[in-house]
Amino acid sequence: MPQNTYIHKPSQASAERRWHLIDAKGQVLGRMATKAATLLRGKHKPTYTDFVDCGDFVVITNAAHVRLTGNKMTQKFYFSHSGYAGGAKTTPVARVMEKDPRKVVYMAVKRMIRDNRLRRKQLARLKIYPGDKHPHAAANSKKAA
């Protein structure tokens, strides 16, 4: 009995996209970002193919109310470097959360998706909002558990 490898067609994948709504209020950042990354990549589907962009749309609301465990709010830093000598910058998570909480959630999800050609396309389907309101109510969003 031969087993054939199933390869999902990109045209078929774009036709099957769904919308998922994640409420981040009180959820732990890492666990919520893992769910979002799984939905964006399409790993929850039986037709998952790793080199085809077969993921869904993800809407994350209440990003300002996401929770970090332990002492991460004071001890965790984001590191960036300009490329020049002495160009290292470290920014504490607390300051980023005050300025724009969407960025913290975005970076957590981004860093859970493999760095390849599909990542930019997959992250384009991620919509993050700091409060309850979002303009995607007409997209009949399904609540992600």
Image (spheres, rainbow, N blue to C red):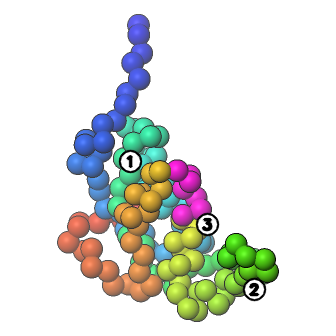
Residue drawn at x 54%, y 65% as measured from the top left: 109
Q: Which residue is mark 1?
A: 53
Q: Which residue is mark 3?
A: 30
For discs 1 and 2, the disc positioned in front in the rendered view: 1
Q: Position of residue 47 (x, y in %)?
A: 37, 37
Q: Which residue is mark 2?
A: 74
Query: Considering only order in the chain, which callout, 2 or 1, is on the residue closer to the N terminus?
Result: 1
Rounded to the nearest angstrom, the CA distance separating label 3 from label 2 is 16 Å
Dot 1: few (<14), some (14–19), or many (≥20) neighbours within 10 Å?
Answer: many
Residue drawn at x 39%, y 72% as measured from the top left: 127
Q: Nearer the viewer, residue 84 or 7?
A: 84
Q: In the rendered structure, which amino acid carries the disc numbered 2?
A: Thr
Image position of 13 with respect to 78: above or below: above
Q: In the rendered structure, which amino acid carries the disc numbered 1?
A: Asp
Residue drawn at x 38%, y 51% as measured from the top left: 55
Dot 3: few (<14), some (14–19), or many (≥20) neighbours within 10 Å?
Answer: some
Q: Quadrant of residue 129?
A: bottom left
The segment highlighted magenta reads: 110-116
Magenta segment includes 22 = no
